Image: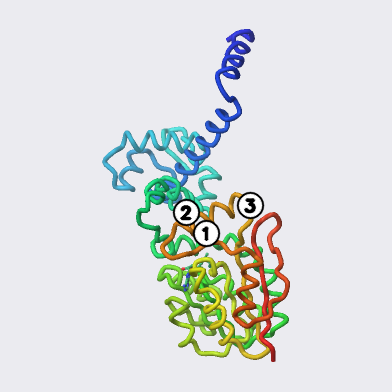
């Protein structure tokens, strides 16, 4: 193609409409396809099947139990074009380094599952929601994936958590909505004589937490209960020297938050600490999106504004320290509250 005709085409494209909006739509569309391709590669088991070693399409179809070899071959070509698999000499397929990075990293797998699934499903189903249709039940239906995706926050929570454990020197810790159990494990590893209880409403998350604690040799000093914290607080064996509420408060209906914070405070020994970590409402896209996702759920949930959360802690009879942003550029806040001795 000559330079002149390339320039003429470019000019036609630029004059045809809003070039920036058109380019963005195409680019975002391709990113969406890429995300869904990765999610499908995880969901169909293609990546796991190839993690066992290279295979021809027919062998792969046998491993996956699919009769649709043509469709599988076309899907593999898509995976090749996004860089997850490669075709080797002899017609066999193998994982690229990028494909292996998805297959081997549970956070990457869970992120594909969550973002291609309920996170973007929200927008596909917004019309019936706006028409007054039934609300979403993501925590009930996807609790395990939510717990796995939340592990992305762990490095940011880690510092403040270790610092708090060092200051409190707890003998008993409670992790409310413990998810994958990483933070309960950190608290117990940082306080080698402490015992800990994790509570999570989701069965998959509770199992995951038990596995995390067992893998780290902490099963003997910990217990993971499955249940809603609002039902368990009265029954939990108090007192605790440190109670962690990390990325959970926004799943509790707004009208119930003060009562929850008050009952958690009652579980804390005098001089002990409640540490609240949460994503907060800001104008950032991640925050706005998550707030909409929460508002679309059953029950009146939403992301807290930092000052509103502080007000709720005060209403619960507590004296919170100044909130701290704990992740650069991200709407993640930690608030520590010491129960007077
Ligand atoms: C976003 S994850 C956070 C997990 C972990 N705390 C972290 O920071 O990585 C929220 C967890 O809270 C659990 N959860 C939500 N509402 C709960 C409730 N009312 N009682 C107990 N667990 C709850 C969910 O099942 C999920 O595992």
The C terminus sits in image quarter = bottom right
Q: Residue at x 63, y 52 (%)?
A: 283
Q: Is mark 1 within 8 Å of ligand 1?
A: yes
Check if mark 2's residue and mark 1's residue have beta carbons within 8 Å.
yes
Location of residue 57 in the rendering, given as x and y in whole percent from the top left corner: 36, 38
Label 1: which secondary element: helix
User: Rounded to the nearest whole Å, what is the CA distance between mark 2 and mark 3?
Assistant: 22 Å
Q: Is residue 146 left or right of residue 70?
A: right
- In depth, the one of 293 and 199 nearer the eye is 293
Q: Is residue 213 left or right of residue 298?
A: right
Of marks 2 and 1, which one's residue comes earlier in the chain?
2
Is the residue marked by circle 3 packed among few (<14), some (14-19), or many (20+) residues within 10 Å?
Answer: few
How many dots with numbers? Answer: 3
Location of residue 14 in the rendering, given as x and y in whole percent from the top left corner: 60, 19
User: Rounded to the nearest whole Å, what is the CA distance between mark 1 and mark 3?
Assistant: 22 Å
Location of residue 206 in the rendering, given as x and y in whole percent from the top left corner: 45, 72
Q: Is residue 340 left or right of residue 176?
A: right
Which-is-in-front pick, marks 2 and 3? 3
Is the residue marked by circle 2 packed among few (<14), some (14-19), or many (20+) residues within 10 Å?
Answer: some
Label 3: which secondary element: loop
Is the residue marked by circle 1 packed among few (<14), some (14-19), or many (20+) residues within 10 Å?
Answer: many
Residue 325 falls in image quadrant: bottom right
Residue carrying label 3: 283
Asked if residue 329 is positioned above or below residue 168 in the image, the reply reads: above
Label 2: which secondary element: helix
The label number, if any, that marks residue 149 in the structure image = 1
The label number, if any, that marks residue 106 in the structure image = none
Residue 47 visible within the image: no
Of marks 1 and 3, which one's residue comes earlier in the chain?
1
User: Rounded to the nearest whole Å, what is the CA distance between mark 2 and mark 1?
Assistant: 7 Å
């Amino acid at each position: 193609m000559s330079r002149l005709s390339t320039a003429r085409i470019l000019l036609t494209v630029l004059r045809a409409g809003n070039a920036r909006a058109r380019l963005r739509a195409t680019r975002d569309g391709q990113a969406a396809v890429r995300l869904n391709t990765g999610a499908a590669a995880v969901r169909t088991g293609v990546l796991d099947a190839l993690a066992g070693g290279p295979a021809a399409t027919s062998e792969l179809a046998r491993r996956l139990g699919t009769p649709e070899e043509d469709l599988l071959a076309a899907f593999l070509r898509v995976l090749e074009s996004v860089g997850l698999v490669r075709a080797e000499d002899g017609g066999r397929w193998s994982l690229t380094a990028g494909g292996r990075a998805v297959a081997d990293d549970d956070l990457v797998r869970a992120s594909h599952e969550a973002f291609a699934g309920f996170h973007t499903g929200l927008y596909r189903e917004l019309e019936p929601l706006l028409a007054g249709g039934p609300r979403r039940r993501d925590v009930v239906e996807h609790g395990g994936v939510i717990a796995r995706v939340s592990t992305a926050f762990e490095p940011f929570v880690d510092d403040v958590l270790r610092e708090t454990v060092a200051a409190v020197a707890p003998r008993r810790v409670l992790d409310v909505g413990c998810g994958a159990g990483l933070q309960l494990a950190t608290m117990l590893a940082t306080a080698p004589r402490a015992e800990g209880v994790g509570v999570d409403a989701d069965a998959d998350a509770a199992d995951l937490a038990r596995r995390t604690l067992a893998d780290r040799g902490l099963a003997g000093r910990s217990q993971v209960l499955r249940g809603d914290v609002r039902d368990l607080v009265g029954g939990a064996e108090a007192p605790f020297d440190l109670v962690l509420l990390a990325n959970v408060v926004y799943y509790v209906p707004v009208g119930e938050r003060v009562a929850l914070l008050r009952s958690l405070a009652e579980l804390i020994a005098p001089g002990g600490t409640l540490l609240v970590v949460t994503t907060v409402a800001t104008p950032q896209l991640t925050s706005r999106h998550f707030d909409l996702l929460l508002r679309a759920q059953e029950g009146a949930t939403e992301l807290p504004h930092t000052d509103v959360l502080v007000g709720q802690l005060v209403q619960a009879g507590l004296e919170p320290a100044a909130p701290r942003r704990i992740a650069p550029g991200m709407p993640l806040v930690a608030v520590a509250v010491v129960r007077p001795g």
